[in-house]
Amino acid sequence: MNRMRQPDATSMIVRVALPLPLPQTFDYLPGSGVAQPGCRVRVPFGHSRKVGVVLEASSQADIAIERLKPVEALLDAEPLFDAGLLADLRRAADYWCGAIGDVVFGALPLGLREGRAPPEFAEECWQATPAGRTACDARTRRGASAALLDVLGDTTWTANELDSLLPGWRAASRRLASAGLIERTHPTRDPPRVRDGATPILTDEQADALATLLSAGEGFRPCLLQGVTGSGKTEIYLRLTERAIAAGKQALWLVPEIGLVPQALRRLRARFDARIAVLHSNLAEGDRARAWLDARSGDAAIVLGTRSAVFAPLPRAGLIVVDEEHDASYKQQEGFRYHARDFALMRAQSLGVPVVLGSATPSLETLANVDAGRYTRVTLRSRVHARPPSPVHVLDLRGLQLAHGLSPALLDALDACIARGEQALVFKNRRGYAPVLMCHACGWHAACPRCEKPLTLYRGRRQLLCHHCGHGERTPETCPNCHASALIPQGQGTERLEEALVSRYPNVPVLRVDRDSTRRRDAFAKVLDKLADGKPAILVGTQMLAKGHDLPSLTTVAIVGVDEGLHSADFHAGERLAQLIVQVAGRAGRADKPGEVWLQTHEPDHPLLATLLKGGHAAATALLLGERLASELPPFAHLALLRAESRQRDALDGFMASARGALASIQRLQPQPARIRIHGPVAAPMPLRAGRHRVQLLLESTQRAPLRQALATWLPHLHALPQPRGLRWSIDVDPVDLY
Ligand code: ADP
Ligand code: ZN
Ligand code: ZN
């Protein structure tokens, strides 16, 4: 099946990455063909076989040539990864201390990891028939069928796109196809183009921004595009994408979460008649592999996806867009702990293409890069539709009587909003009914036996759940300690707020949006559908509500629990809180219906809140940057965290002591050992989780180079230490949280 090439006399071995959490590569004899770097091969490994990816051909083996085994089979005729991407993956593995095999295989879609042949391209497209368009206009269909017909009414979509827009569209497509309302078609092979009449005239501010972005010419240039929601950032991305496509190049768009894929996809499809490869974790294996290969072949003019789409091959790269660049979801929190925004920057640099980071609330890291002159900043100050910013009111909770955590003034504001016929959003970053269930008689509280943290009460399900490990138990009727019937919920979660609001507004729909209520794939979309008519309603929910989705009738936004963000062990908390307030506030009001924002707090004079209210996000970030500088924290210092956990406390402490010892001896050999500070080992902020003890060691340096040097030297020592059974450890470079 594969084309064999003549062995190359100078390259005697191939160096292969295997899907193992180990830092090294493995050498093999080339076998009967020459596998180019980036091709998959099947190789013998121990007593079994594994699929690997060839990283390079070399004339020098790590071990004696006689002991090497040959490659068994070459699985790809053409490399899956080009040389540039392979080099970037190796850089990424180095930077974030990943195992090269993990990194390379993590970059491949699941469907290609196991050595099967790449799926054949049978690209599937759907469109409405004339009868279907009539039915769509006549609104004769309901539910999923109506939704699909609506989407197919004026545009042809690929199956890959429909997977992202309408989960569960396949069942509807069978019904509609057998009724003759929709049909399968072939994708166009026409060159990508801009749809007629789809492009608005830029505002002056947008035109200036675009001119600045374009003035730097081709090549690598990182830009921050800063502007509140609705200021027209996406329109700028579209214009830059248009440029790239017109030049025959590809554009990569990253969004931080799956929920934001559909609206980006709609905007792209409304503007371009072009092939778009959509990549995220909610796709079937084969579909994802197909989309990935579509990017790799260069056929897809646009690649849109979440975090891992940053690994998509881009043979004709012309532009990278990272929307909501500040979002912590870009950081992978397990396995290979990379940051997709930062990897996007690395890739843009090696590809030599512009990269645009967009946000209303840029991260402190990015702002520091702007201040240092490394990134160009372009700002959009006003909203396209002349929406005035919403006034923010601070509600001082001190001494007030609260009803389920809601103050009288906030309830008045909600009353008025509903009376005006508008919609409100009540934000609380805590799921469940209450974060603690306590006995009023003896002080007992329900705690997780495996984490020793309070269990969250779920009243509807009569359950107590641990948010850290998933442990669950039935809610007791009486106190297990003193048997009194005196158990009372402490604090509020979204379920409790929902209950309180339902009882206060029996005739208004109260819709809860959090991870519990949106377990089903299309649940969130259904909630948004219910709000689309603009009739009075109240949304209650967590972080999920903070961004995206324009709701024209939403005018009143309340953040119920600000104080949690003011007091956290993690130094990122202040930055997150400022982002959250600005993002949530951005959801309120339109030109015709002014919005208002309410913040409930016990600390109305907290410097961060006061600065944010007076000077906006810019003033708040200046304050936060000043604090970070004074205390030598990122972005003015660089951190790496060694985390380890085990059920056996002794084994854990032993391992960490050896790790610390190894680091100390490396440090002694350094010319300037004082340049890295080592904190710990200390118990993690959450010292026990799911029955495992957790300990961490923090490395800190004001300069990147010595820290990287120390990590590179330390890592082999860590792998060489005795690894106690059941102990897990990981290194997190630039951690986004310290838990
Ligand atoms: P952002 O990405 O900053 O939230 P968008 O680009 O989505 O902003 O713009 C907000 C709204 O304004 C969208 O509905 C968009 O279609 C519209 N819009 C953007 N630019 C223009 C323009 N120049 N003329 C008319 N409408 C525009
Ligand atoms: Zn009790
Ligand atoms: Zn637990």
Image (spheres, rainbow, N blue to C red):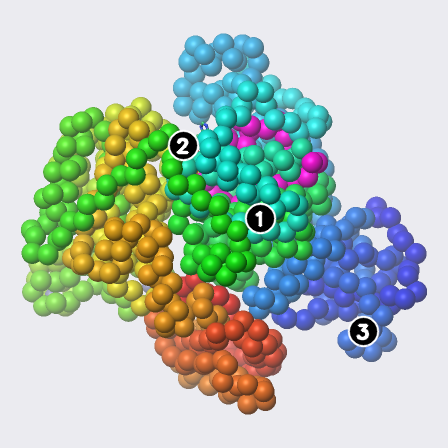
In this rendered view, identify the residue nearer to me: 690 or 190: 190
Pinpoint residue 567: horizontal percent, then vertical percent.
Answer: 26, 64
Q: Can you tell me whether the CB of the residue at mark 1 lies under 8 Å from the nearest atom of ligand 1? A: no
Is residue 263 visible to us here?
Answer: no
Q: Residue at x 51, y 77 (%)?
A: 725
Nearer mark to the viewer, of 2 and 3? 2
Which of the two labelled residues, at mark 3 and mark 1, occupies the earlier sequence position?
3
Which of the two labelled residues, at mark 1 and mark 2, occupies the earlier sequence position?
1
Q: Residue at x 86, y 58 (%)?
A: 34
> In the image, is residue 70 above or below residue 289?
below
Three-letter code for the amino acid on which mark 2 is drawn: Val
Q: Is residue 615 left or right of residue 194?
A: left
Residue located beneath label 3 in the image? 61
Residue 291 picture quarter: top right
Q: Residue at x 62, y 22 (%)?
A: 184
Three-letter code for the amino acid on which mark 3 is drawn: Ala
Gap in angstroms between the C-alphas marked 1 and 2: 23 Å
Q: Is residue 227 left or right of residue 156?
A: left
Residue located beneath label 2 in the image? 384
In this rendered view, identify the residue nearer to me: 83 or 243: 243
Q: Is residue 637 left or right of residue 276?
A: left
Gap in angstroms between the C-alphas marked 2 and 3: 61 Å
Residue located beneath label 1 in the image? 355
Magenta span:
247-275
